[in-house]
Image (spheres, grey):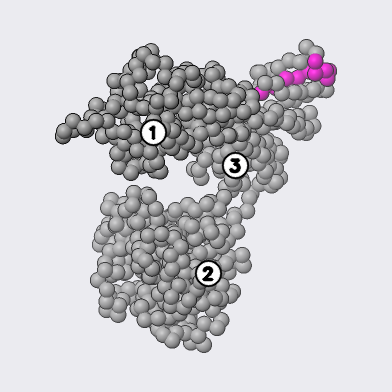
Amino acid sequence: MKKLFFIAFLLLSIASSPAGMTISPWQQLFQGVDHAVGTNYPDATIPRLQVVHCVRVDLNNPDVQLFTTPPAPNFSLEGTETLTLTVSNFLKSYHLAVAIDANFYDANPGGSDPPAEGLPCEVHGLQICTGAVVSVPDFHNRYASLMFTRNKQAFFDFDNRPPGTNTDDIYTAITGYYPILSNGVNFAAAAIISYPDQNIHAVQPRTVHGISGDGQYLFMMTIDGRQSGYSEGALDTESAKWMLQFGGWNAINMDGGGSTALYMADCAGNPVALNHSSFVALTGGARERYIGSHFGVLAKPLPSQLDSVTVTPGDTTAIVSWQTDVAATTQVEYGPTLNFGSSTPVDSRPATNHIATLTGLFPGANYYYRAVSVADGNRLTSGCQAFRTTNSFDATELLSLTSSWKYTTNNLDGVNWPSPGYDDSGWSGPSPALLYVEDNGAVAPRNTLLPPGFVSPPVTVLPPTYYFRTHFNFTGSTANVSLVFSNYIDDGAVFYLSGAEVARVRMPSAPTRITYTSLANGSNPSSPPCSGDATVSCPTLFTLSGSVVQNLVPGDNLLAAEVHNFNVNSPDIVFGAALTAARSTSATPRLNIYASGDIATLYWNGSGFTLEQATVFDPSSNSWSMVSGPLSLSPVTVTNAGTKFYRLRR
């Protein structure tokens, strides 16, 4: 078996980096996986700004596994070898801990910049996924292969040309363009001669994979580029300098540029970008590049320092409990992102059983949390955890965005046209929304072209106001029902439910009287991600509840709207409205109690409830009183309470 194996040298820790180069301490992401960041001050060593991310993988960790892009379902060698996928979706699809770009590729269509995921790709150079050959060495000038046996022993072949090295014992393999480090020697400058390509040897975003001298560590490194004032990219020799600083001994330059992307999984398995992709920056954050070759790592999450950590989600609250071996404080950090942003008050009373209630949550939403206890100055955490709150509403669609409306452009000042009893038989329609006049394709689906008015050469005079009416059927009780509107409106509108005005959108507020010639006082935002007056990305949302929807009745209901332009003779108008009835399904929470000695902790999931107590259990008596406070926030701790009964009351 032909393999180029480098004799292992132990690279001693570097006391200091070259002037201008700084590397952060390694931070554990997963078991066997660490992350560090390199930054620099431009100087003679590296005369440009660079931000470098490096993931270090312990190949001796038995739970760490390596994974590359698998063969396409309709695999054909040198044809459809893989399918395009973003790095973040590669990570998510295969439940990886970390993922990065790998080999060069050629997609059809699109070449190096395909327009979508799922397109066939030919991969350049050797690639093997869990023993399956995805791509063989070819003549695309990509010859520097990094190979791993099933037990993750690493080998390089810097010149793996056809027919290629024997891969009988190889379980995982990727291939880059050329080597930049060999046995700790930076010989990247030689690549300019051996692999002439002015573009790739210029200052570029970089992806580099390396192995430590003793073979224990794999390094997955990115250098961000094409982002002035943040990170400009790197030359080959500069990439090698950074890899040496992180601990690499042998390394190869992989696909880079807009393909350079490094992601990790959060505690819910969702991708989190570690580097700043130049392609994402170029597209204004719209998307990543779809690529044909990826490399990833499977690893176990970091173990919790706390015992028996559990979360019980409610609709707007959640209970987190855990245990510690020694008495410690109690706190939970939580929020909708990994930055958390909120925390429960610190309960400084030492305890071994811990309970905290998270409040202010939204129904049906995803949250992250971290339980924290401090004992004898030592901070213990559960690590990142995730949960989803319950949904406290049943939703019923009453109107879809494409429901049909009757419409007219006649001046209806002084006419009670929103009334259910009004005769609209002379109106146009019914025709399906979206209804529009020259919206330039900003909103879809455009179903009904409205009359644009009359022509007075050379100007088309548009009506300032359009009127709409439609019916919907409502079943069941109207108690505790909210009406949720999602609309595309260009520019302003007034809504009526069964004859009563219920909402104004970008119109003069009440008590100003709205007439046929009234103009909207605004339009949808024009700043990113919105553009124009009415866009798919910027619908107008609002909810009606309480007395505002008192005209809602079981059976037939009439919804009416008048849409006003922002300017006289405005060239466009758009209208469409989706309507949903939402009914609260919140249940009475369960009251829990945990007793330890003469201390009792009461806790529950829910908001709007007050804790009451009594010495005799009689639900109908007047002997119940509020626990001093009154206390409406879980958990509640009572001491030396004796025999008492507790209940929750809204």
Q: Residue 251, position in %: x, y?
A: 41, 72
Residue 228 visible: yes
Q: Looking at the picture, how far across and down is residue 636, in whole percent?
A: 69, 27
Which-is-in-front pick, marks 1 and 3?
Answer: 1
Q: Nearer the viewer, residue 141 or 81?
A: 81
| Residue 391 against residue 49 in the figure, above or below | above
Q: What separation in Å lies between label 3 and label 2 (alpha carbons)?
A: 34 Å
Q: CA distance from mark 1 to mark 2?
A: 44 Å
Residue at x 38% of width, y 50% of height: 286
> Where residue 341 sits in the image (x, y, percent)?
50, 37
Left or right placement of residue 601 versus residue 7 in this view: right
Question: Which one is in front, 496 or 390?
Answer: 496
**What span is in magenta?**
609-620
| Among numbered discs 3 and 2, the one appearing first in the sequence | 2
Residue beneath label 1, please? 575
Q: Secondary structure at mark 3?
A: strand
The residue lying furthest to the left in this view is 458
| Residue linked to disc 3 | 388
